[in-house]
Amino acid sequence: MAKTVPLDAPTLAWARAEFARYYSRAAVMPPDRLARREFAAFPFAEATVMRRHATLPTPAELSAYLREVVPRHVYYSSAYYRLPAEPTMAAKGWLGADLIFDLDSDHLRGAPELDYAGQLELVKSRLLDLVDDFLVRDFGVDTATTSFVFSGGRGYHVHVRDEQFLSLTSPERREIVDYLLGNGISPRATVERRAEDVSAGRTAGLADDTELRRPRGAPAHSVQLAAPDAPGWRGRTTRAVFKALDEWEARGWKTAAREMTEAGIAPERARRWAKHLVEGGWAERIRSTRTLDVFGKDPPEDFLEHVIHRVAVDVQAETDAPVTTDIHRLIRLPGSLHGGTGLRVVPLSREEVDRFDPFRDAAMDEKGEERSTAVTFLADARYPFPDGGLHGVAGATDELPTAQALFLVLRGEASLRPSPGR
């Protein structure tokens, strides 16, 4: 849920005033089935406790709530209830829930080595994998019934409102999560076994009938990757293998060896495989024939497990229970401000996702006004905001656009410069 940096009283008052200014002007689009939703919020206070079980059945009441309460974080339920204001889940009367996916950069492979901007780029690429490869290709989800939302913080949310998913129970949603994570996917099930014509010295059934001489001592069958466009995890594994090979050839065998070792493959084996793949022609042979016989194993399960891990989409939440399986989950309200960054929680269409830049498109809209605020940097800071970016050195003081100053202060990377006399 909300992760916030503690602020002193004057800074809290300033930040709240900036949020109030935003909510006095913003037209926040209410979620569908508004009257069936529960709302909750964290206030601007030195000790914050979530206030929940609110109902805002009309757009006017939602707007008034945001203007009057001025929440630091505001959420609404993914679930629909008969009586959403009741204090217990049993009394609320659950009617169904949107299918929610939460992609957070904290849980992505490779994210810890990146800065905040790099993490947002990475998590967006995984969002597109989730939507295009899993939801649309495998589950047949119509993007017209789907909302994509920049969380204002570390990632993106996907809201699927398709009627066929609304009544799914938590265990049923757990099965979807397991599928996305590749849990229970057998490496053997992602490949094909083809009989080999020993007398002709070729593998029967290759898609392009490419001749493949059988090495001495090799089994009388061939283990192959499925066609790249095969449905489900079979085609996905093939595409992931090809992508990994391309990346390793570009970055060198040592990178390939390190990645495979980190994935649990024995170091000596990882180094040997990496050298053969990158420098010994194995990669080209796999691409041209889709055979995995180069590994000399039937099939190389540890290699395939690594590839499955590479392509799986991690939709785990901050806690042990993924957001997707929680049928009572509270999710950030699109159009609101994130209390840890001051960035807007931005709803997007699938077409808008590709060109969306959080530093350009999620900052508070000043409607042509140019306001600035003086801050002292508490740490070195570098962010790709428009017009040259934001750059600061710890201990320095600078006059910044107010939206950028708010961003740094809420993240704990800057403090307000004291006014004269303070």
Image (spheres, rainbow, N blue to C red):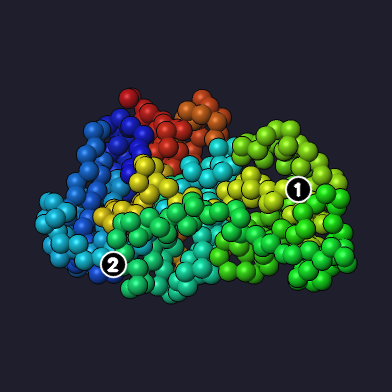
Q: Which residue of the protein is positioned furthest toward the front in this rendering? A: 199
Examine the rendered structure and indicate whether residue 214 appears above or below residue 267: below
* Camera-nearest residue between 196 and 133: 196
Quadrant location, the N terminus = top left
Residue 285 at x, y percent in the picture: 82, 57
Q: Residue at point 87% right, 59% down? A: 213
> What's under tag 1, amino acid-wise?
Phe
Badge 2 is on which residue? Answer: 167
Q: Secondary structure at mark 1?
A: helix
> What's under tag 2, amino acid-wise?
Ser
Examine the rendered structure and indicate whether residue 396 appears above or below residue 384: above
Q: In the shown orientation, is residue 130 left or right of residue 151?
A: right
Q: Is residue 61 visible?
A: no
Examine the rendered structure and indicate whether residue 4 appears above or below residue 73: above
Q: Earlier in the sequence, mark 1 or mark 2?
A: 2
Q: Residue at point 78% right, 38% down? A: 272
- Return the mark for residue 295: 1
* Camera-nearest residue between 262 and 201: 201
